Every structure is written in C-alpha cells, then in structure tokens.
C-alpha cells in the first residue's frame, strides 16, 4: 500500500470474512473485515502503489560450451587385457616416463577377482590409478 486514510480495528478479534469496495473516480479502496456479522477492522482510503519492475531478469541457466580436447599424458599398460583395448599414448616399459598405470582384468567369477586383487593392490600402492568397471557379454572388466 502507498497510503491509508483511516484504519479502525477491534483488538483481539478473529478475522473471518472481508469485503472491498472501489469507488469510481478515486484511486483508493475501502476494505472491511468481519468476525461473523460484527465489523472488526475498517480500512478507508487504501491507496495502492504501482508495481515497478526492476532490472530485467537474466537467464541463470549455465550454457555448456565445447572446449578443445586436452591430450592426456602417457600411461603404462600392464597385462594382456588392457592391450586389447588399444588405448592411445601408452607404453609397456616401466622405465619410460608415464603419468599412470592402466590395468584391465577380465573376471567371470569371484575367484578371478580374488586372483587379480593382489596384483592390482600392489600397482595402486606404487602410483596413481583409476578404477573402471565395464560389464558386457557376461563378464566384468575392471
């Protein structure tokens, strides 16, 4: 509201019903609020301010932009399964510079997983590694 000419209220009343009246030619509203049949609040000459829109809203949704693909450094591959993946920029020699070690195992049973567990743990203790698990054709590749 911008202004109120007169406000009359009965303290402690429960507000249950209201009515409003707009008089022709005036820019104000009279509002009466009732508790059943008894008038408990009377607002005379309620002038409403116009709503002004602020700065236009901007879309805050993130727009994904394509970036140039960054080449990774060389990885050392260990085992026959990882060689079958034909990864780019790999070496088999431990003495050549490499950022990480890639190993892939093909496990068709829990016994296979237990058999490779020690080898994978010892490689992970020596250098940085990532675990990747692929499932397909009834096998799990990790």
Image (cartoon, helix red, strand yellow):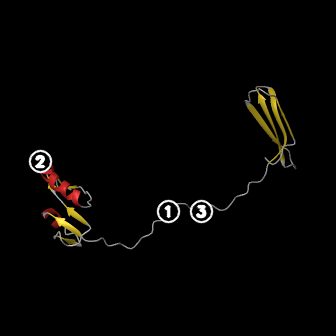
> Could you classify mark 1 by the number of other residues whose Cα lies within 10 Å: few (under 14), some (14-19), or many (20 or more)?
few
Tag count: 3
Q: Which residue is mark 1?
A: 62
User: In the rendered image of this protein, does residue 41 appear above or below residue 124?
Assistant: above
Q: Which residue is mark 2?
A: 111
Q: Quadrant of residue 71?
A: bottom left
Give the CA separation, mark 2 to mark 3: 58 Å
Q: Residue at x 18, y 60 (%)?
A: 104
Give the CA separation, mark 1 to mark 2: 47 Å
| Label 3 element class | loop
| Label 2 element class | helix
Whether residue 115 sits left or right of residue 89 in the image: it is left
> Could you classify mark 2 by the number of other residues whose Cα lies within 10 Å: few (under 14), some (14-19), or many (20 or more)?
few
- Residue sitting nearer the eye, 88 or 50: 88
Q: Residue at x 15, y 52 (%)?
A: 118
Whether residue 82 sits left or right of residue 10 in the image: it is left
Give the CA separation, mark 1 to mark 3: 11 Å
Q: Which residue is mark 3?
A: 58
- Residue sitting nearer the eye, 3 or 68: 68
* Image quadrant where one finds the C terminus: bottom left
Which numbered dot is residue 130? none
Q: Is residue 81 visible?
A: yes
- Residue sitting nearer the eye, 97 or 141: 97
């Amino acid at each position: 509201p911008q202004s109120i000419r007169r406000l009359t209220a009965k303290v402690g009343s429960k507000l249950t019903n209201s009515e409003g009246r707009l008089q022709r030619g005036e820019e104000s509203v009279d509002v009466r609020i009732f508790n059943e049949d008894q008038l408990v609040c009377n607002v005379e000459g309620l002038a409403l301010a116009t709503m002004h829109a602020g700065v236009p809203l901007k879309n805050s949704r993130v727009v994904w932009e394509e970036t140039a693909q960054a080449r990774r450094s060389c990885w050392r591959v260990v085992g026959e399964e990882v060689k079958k993946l034909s990864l780019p920029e790999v070496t088999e020699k431990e003495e050549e510079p490499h950022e990480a070690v890639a190993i892939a195992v093909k496990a068709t049973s829990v016994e296979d997983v237990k058999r490779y567990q020690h080898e994978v743990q010892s490689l992970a203790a020596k250098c940085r590694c990532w675990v990747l698990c692929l499932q397909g054709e009834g096998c799990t590749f990790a």
